[in-house]
Amino acid sequence: MLAQLIQIPLKELQSEAFQIRKAHFGNELTFSIPSTVSYHDDTLSFHKDRFAAISVTGSHCDLRCGHCQGKLLESMIPAKSPETFLQVADRLLSGGAHGILVSGGANQNGEVPLEAFIPSIREIKEKNPEFKVIVHTGLIRREVAKELKEAGVDQILIDVIGDDATIREVYHLNKRVKDYEKTLSMLKEMGHNLAPHIIIGHHFGEIRGEWKALEMVTRAGVETIVLVILKPLFSVGKNHFRIPKPDETSRISAVARILNPKIPIRMGCIRPAHPSKAEMEKGFIDSGVNTIAYPLQGTIEYAKELGLGTRFIEMCCSLI
């Protein structure tokens, strides 16, 4: 079915995807503003750190992936010890935060080193059951996944990569696509709420493993799918990266919706600051997504022109 869908003209795909979305989710489109990145709107009031991202490795990452090199971690609150982690969480709680994203740099096995922080996560959840704790794990061992489940984490986020060369050349990892598929299966079997992320243009802007990644998350039967678009986070030669085209991002989001008619699909936080950004966001709406994080003003207006009811939520998009 996937191979057939890829060949259908984009406008036909989007028409079907939009109707599927309306049939299963109605007319509401949500906009996620979790405060993990800066966002300003003169007409709305947002609160700092309503949903904050914490890095358990600070700005350090062993992998120094080709598209990031640790830059994404610099925007997170550093908490490199369990004691600091609890202090940060307590401060956020007292300030009215709704939850936290726990993340960090990966080691040479593609794992975020979370073990030492699991008792702290358990303590936070036991004291504040309504406080959301979602965890970006990378590849994860079964025993760590089990401990996170027992600690009460609300959701697991994992970047799913569908191309061996991308794993090797972008992530600098000695892993294979099958390792990500096994991890998804194990997490699902364990009963975790899963929000896999598919990065469009993962291989320096090329569309390579995205279709395989989509096939994997569809087969796994996850709770939500988050689509993000490659955003180079450091200065490189101008020919090193290409920006995915809006018709490419729209096609992937439309096919994701058709393959997963009842699963919420989100346009996540990351996308390039590029002249085509507005067209990408509108294309995602036309392709039937449920949520867009940090929308442009023109995107909000476009949704209203289509007759969609819009709502802003200060929460990570994967939890809406």
Image (cartoon, rainbow, N blue to C red):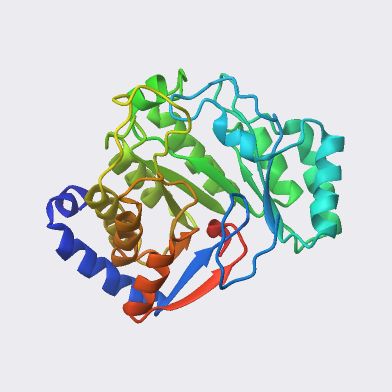
Left or right: 52, with 227 as reference point: right
Residue positioned 63% across, 34% down in the render: 74
Say if 251 sits above or below 42 in the image. above
How far across and how far down the image is residue 95, in percent? 81, 59
Asked whether residue 18 is in view, the answer is yes
Residue positioned 41% across, 25% down in the render: 167
Residue positioned 47% across, 52% down in the render: 268
Left or right: 291, with 125 as reference point: left
How far across and how far down the image is residue 201, in percent? 33, 38
Left or right: 84, with 9 as reference point: right
Left or right: 159, with 315 as reference point: left
Number of on-image labels: 0
Of the pair 190 and 12, the residue shown nearer to us? 12
Q: Which quadrant of the view contains residue 209?
A: top left
Say if 78 sits above or below 190 in the image. above
On-image quarter of the C terminus: bottom right
How far across and how far down the image is residue 131, in percent? 75, 60
Say if 128 sits above or below 235 in the image. below
Of the pair 308 and 157, the residue shown nearer to us? 308
Residue positioned 64% across, 45% down in the render: 135
How far across and how far down the image is residue 108, in percent? 56, 18
Asked whether residue 133 is in view, the answer is no
Residue at the outermost front position: 42
